């Protein structure tokens, strides 16, 4: 999943954007103030693209853009502006922004602009990881192998893909629909709801000390599944 950062103080807009962006396969982190954004963006490598509102209670998106550009010239930045703020559009682009979209906007258009900027930047490819680590779990992405406490796990291709997806989204609940969409590989390898339940059960049998009381691959009732790297106390 491409990782997006949103700076916005309108709660209703945040809720709508979160629903739509996550439905379109993006992972979203939100800050509601410039101060919170400055703190979170000390590590821009955690994100693939920034969405910055211009007017915030404690400053502007331009302030955040300046800080980010001082340490990362490549991360794409899209400004969210009001329809009558032409001067802000010019200021944002001249100050390091890559694109802008005026409110109110169509969510489909925003998703298209995001994907276009991600393609141009190539950042996900530049940052392609070679491994995943979570607690006692180690996944060698180049070799396609997974180890739990130095013990190699015998996984099918589908089980391996499911495990990688969960670990990549550690601490976040993934719905069954999100998982099913991600496991569909476009080559006819269809995974249905019942099959997913089987994969989850098999992963628990291979990963957990007690599969009947899992400490890592958790079921969040009514929502989906969540990966926890550390054992629950």
Image (cartoon, rainbow, N blue to C red):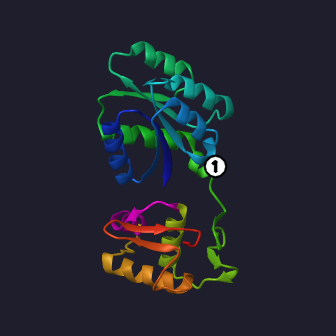
Q: Is residue 166 above or below residue 128?
A: below
For the residue pair 89 and 223, the one nearer the viewer reads as: 223
* 57 in magenta: no
Determine the image quadrant of residue 53: top left
Q: Secondary structure at mark 1?
A: helix
* Residue 74 image point, x, y percent: 62, 36
Determine the image quadrant of residue 44: top right
For the residue pair 119 and 144, the one nearer the viewer reads as: 144
Q: Would you name the residue on which mark 1 appears?
A: 126
Which residue is rendered at x = 37% and y = 62% of the image? 178
Q: Is residue 72 above or below residue 183?
A: above
Residue range (magenta): 169-184
For the residue pair 129 and 19, the one nearer the viewer reads as: 19
Which residue is rendered at x = 50% and y = 67% of the image? 166
* Residue 147 image point, x, y percent: 65, 78
Determine the image quadrant of residue 184: bottom left
């Amino acid at each position: 999943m491409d990782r997006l950062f949103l700076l916005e103080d309108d709660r209703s807009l945040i809720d709508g954007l979160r629903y739509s962006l996550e439905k379109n396969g993006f992972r979203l982190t939100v800050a509601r103030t410039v101060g919170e954004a400055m703190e979170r963006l000390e590590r821009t490598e955690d994100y693939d693209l920034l969405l910055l509102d211009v007017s915030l209670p404690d400053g502007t998106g331009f302030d955040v853009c300046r800080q980010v550009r001082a340490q990362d010239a490549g991360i794409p930045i899209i400004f969210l502006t009001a329809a009558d703020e032409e001067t802000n559009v010019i200021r944002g682009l001249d100050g390091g922004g890559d694109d802008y979209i005026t409110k109110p906007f169509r969510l489909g258009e925003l998703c298209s602009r995001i994907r276009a900027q991600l393609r141009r930047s190539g950042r996900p490819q530049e940052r392609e990881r070679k491994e995943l680590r979570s607690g006692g779990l180690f996944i060698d992405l180049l070799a396609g192998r997974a180890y739990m406490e130095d013990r190699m796990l015998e996984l099918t291709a589908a089980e391996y893909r499911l495990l990688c997806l969960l670990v990549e989204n550690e601490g976040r609940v993934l719905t069954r629909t999100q998982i099913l969409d991600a496991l569909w590989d476009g080559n006819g390898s269809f995974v249905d709801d019942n099959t997913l339940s089987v994969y989850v059960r098999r992963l628990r049998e291979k990963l957990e000390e007690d599969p009947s009381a899992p400490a890592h691959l958790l079921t969040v009732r009514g929502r989906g599944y969540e990966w926890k790297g550390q054992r629950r106390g």
